[in-house]
Image (cartoon, helix red, strand yellow):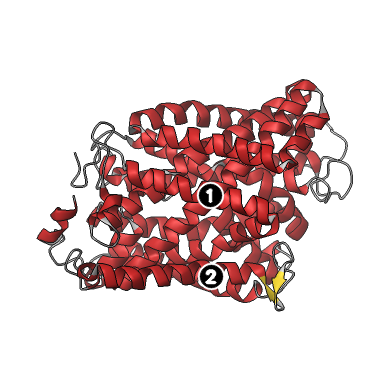
């Protein structure tokens, strides 16, 4: 059992990778991202995927080094506190929790949409798809998905792993089948198809620096979620090494899947703006659904089922990160100790899991009724928080290992160069998104007083975190005086102060 009461040694390398893949949700992510990206860069989508992969890999390497030195379920929160102090650590933890809790509502909403699309597809009754637009039906089914995912996440990690093996395995099988058939049809002369070209992989052929920047921003969306493998570090076998390896493997596997899908569908459908061309604005919101029939014929429903499976499985696995971060924040006295309670039978952060589910469910239900624009603009604004907490972790890695930067070439690359470059890229994206989102046309096009709603929501969520942090400073000053989690570096004692144990 870990120091926080979690079940140690229950997750192996394969299990961690599978949960990481599930959290990223490649089927859902790619069907949402492919069309809009084609509209920006045409055939250079594979090049943008490669460009976007670089900062994620660099940050993942920094995460791996931090995990090797300090395996802790609090990950970003704990590491940033150790390296940069309690104020930065608390806000970094808030960024992770806010992003993951709010995206839970998005995943549940997507699962509802694809459930009714699948029912319409299988039954031949197109009207069933419209049920997703009925607010009452949508919210009730969404809450049912959330309840089911919470029930699984509340139980032991073995249950989560068994479920994810089935869901992720099916998802990847369908995606590989989809890509393989698309490549075969393109190779046999499908009308509108194009032969695969190495030029598609050339980043210098991207038409503009703005499009290149869009590719980096895209990486935040399509690769986000791999860090869940690190939040399970107190529950993995060989916690010093397995989570870091799982993060690296997860990012590389996702890169391979994305390149396969991008190349196969570009070759099959082309970038035309009519028919099933990927440049057609009528199909860009859900490219896989539009291409499922032309590619797989009578098996088209498998694609909708894969995307439904993708969003549903990601909904369940995404609970892992916020629950364990909240657990760590409660354990070290940064939040009430209620969050630090572990279920005596399942050895999971039960209270933290339920709290995340309640907040996500309430947020979705209220926003779906009040304004769908506000709901989706909040999701768009999450990119700021993701850049913030990934970037904070990268800089924490650089500073924490500052005394050993030049001990070896490996140390210089993994503790200085990689996380520093990755952190700088994320910082630039954070500022760029902050500035761009002030435009009223950004996101849904909604604004308040001439300022984009996405900007106001993003800043509002971060500001709410700052207010809560000040409240916790008044209620729990010990953490902010570094009494329960000491600031340190790679050359000092890493054992928490004795007061830490009082929160266990």
The residue to which callout 2 is attached is 460
Q: Residues within 10 Å of mark 1 (few under 14, many from 20)?
A: few
Q: Residues within 10 Å of mark 2 (few under 14, many from 20)?
A: some
Please report the residue visible at 49 percent of the width from the left and 64 percent of the height from the top. 385
Question: Which x, y percent locates residue 414?
Answer: 34, 61
Q: Quadrant of residue 349?
A: top left
Foreground residue, 234 or 183? 234
Foreground residue, 409 or 281? 281
Comes first in the chain, label 2 or label 1: 1
The residue to which callout 1 is attached is 362
Give above or below for 347 relative to 209. Answer: above
Question: Which x, y percent locates residue 44?
Answer: 70, 55
Drawn side of residue 302 relative to residue 432, left or right: right
Q: Quadrant of residue 115?
A: top right
Q: Are marks 2 and 1 in contact (CB under 8 Å)?
A: no
Q: Quadrant of residue 446?
A: bottom right
- Callout 1: SS: helix
Task: Give the alpha-carbon distance from disc 2 to disc 1, as whole Å.
Answer: 18 Å
The answer to whether any part of residue 339 appears in the image is yes
The answer to whether any part of residue 18 appears in the image is no
Q: Residue furthest left?
A: 498
Foreground residue, 30 or 103? 103
Please report the residue visible at 45 percent of the width from the left and 28 percent of the height from the top. 163
Say which quadrant the N terminus sits in: top left
Give above or below for 414 relative to 424. Answer: above
Question: Which x, y percent locates residue 219?
Answer: 57, 57
- Callout 2: SS: helix
Please report the residue visible at 73 percent of the width from the left and 40 percent of the height from the top. 134
Drawn side of residue 307 relative to residue 91, left or right: right
């Amino acid at each position: 059992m870990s120091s926080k009461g979690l079940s140690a040694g229950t997750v192996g390398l394969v299990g961690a990778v599978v949960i990481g893949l599930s959290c990223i949700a490649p089927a859902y992510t790619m069907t949402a991202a492919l069309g809009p990206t084609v509209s920006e860069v045409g055939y250079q989508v594979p090049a943008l995927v490669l460009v976007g992969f670089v900062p994620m890999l660099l940050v993942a390497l920094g995460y791996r080094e931090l995990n090797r030195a300090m395996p802790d379920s609090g990950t970003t929160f704990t590491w940033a506190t150790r390296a940069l102090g309690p104020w930065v650590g608390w806000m970094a933890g808030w960024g992770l929790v806010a992003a993951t809790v709010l995206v839970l509502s998005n995943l549940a909403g997507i699962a509802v949409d694809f459930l009714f699309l699948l029912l319409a597809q299988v039954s031949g009754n197109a009207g069933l798809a419209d049920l997703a637009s009925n607010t009452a039906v949508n919210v009730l089914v969404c809450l049912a998905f959330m309840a089911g995912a919470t029930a699984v996440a509340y139980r032991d990690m073995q249950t989560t792993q068994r479920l994810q093996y089935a869901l992720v395995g099916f998802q990847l099988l369908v995606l590989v089948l989809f890509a393989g058939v698309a490549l075969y049809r393109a190779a046999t002369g499908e009308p509108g198809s194009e032969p695969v070209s190495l030029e598609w992989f050339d980043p210098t052929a991207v038409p503009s620096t703005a499009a290149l920047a869009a590719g980096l921003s895209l990486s935040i969306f399509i690769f986000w979620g791999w860090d869940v493998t690190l939040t399970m570090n107190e529950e993995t076998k060989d916690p010093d090494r397995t989570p870091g390896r799982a993060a690296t493997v997860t990012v590389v596997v996702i890169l391979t899947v994305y390149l396969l899908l991008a190349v196969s569908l570009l070759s099959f459908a082309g970038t035309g703006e009519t028919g099933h061309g990927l440049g057609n604005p009528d199909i860009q919101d859900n490219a896989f659904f539009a291409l499922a029939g032309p590619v797989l014929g009578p098996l088209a429903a498998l694609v909708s089922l894969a995307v439904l499976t993708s969003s549903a499985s990601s909904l369940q696995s995404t609970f892992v990160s916020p629950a364990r971060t909240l657990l760590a924040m409660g354990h070290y006295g940064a939040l009430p100790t209620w969050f630090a309670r572990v279920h005596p039978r399942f050895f999971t952060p039960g209270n933290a899991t339920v709290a995340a589910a309640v907040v996500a469910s309430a947020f979705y239900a209220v926003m779906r009724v009040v304004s769908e624009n506000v709901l989706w603009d909040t999701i768009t604004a999450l990119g700021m928080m993701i850049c913030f907490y990934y970037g904070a972790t990268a800089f924490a890695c650089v500073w924490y290992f500052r005394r050993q930067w030049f001990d070896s070439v490996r140390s210089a690359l993994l503790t200085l160069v990689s996380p520093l470059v990755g952190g700088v890229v994320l910082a630039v994206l954070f500022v760029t998104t902050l500035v761009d989102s002030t435009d009223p046309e950004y996101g849904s096009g909604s604004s308040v007083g001439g300022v984009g709603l996405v900007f106001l929501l993003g800043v509002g969520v971060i500001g709410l975190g700052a207010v809560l942090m000040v409240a916790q400073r008044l209620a729990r000053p010990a953490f902010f005086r570094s009494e329960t989690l000491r600031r340190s570096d790679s050359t000092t004692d890493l054992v928490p102060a004795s007061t830490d144990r009082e929160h266990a």
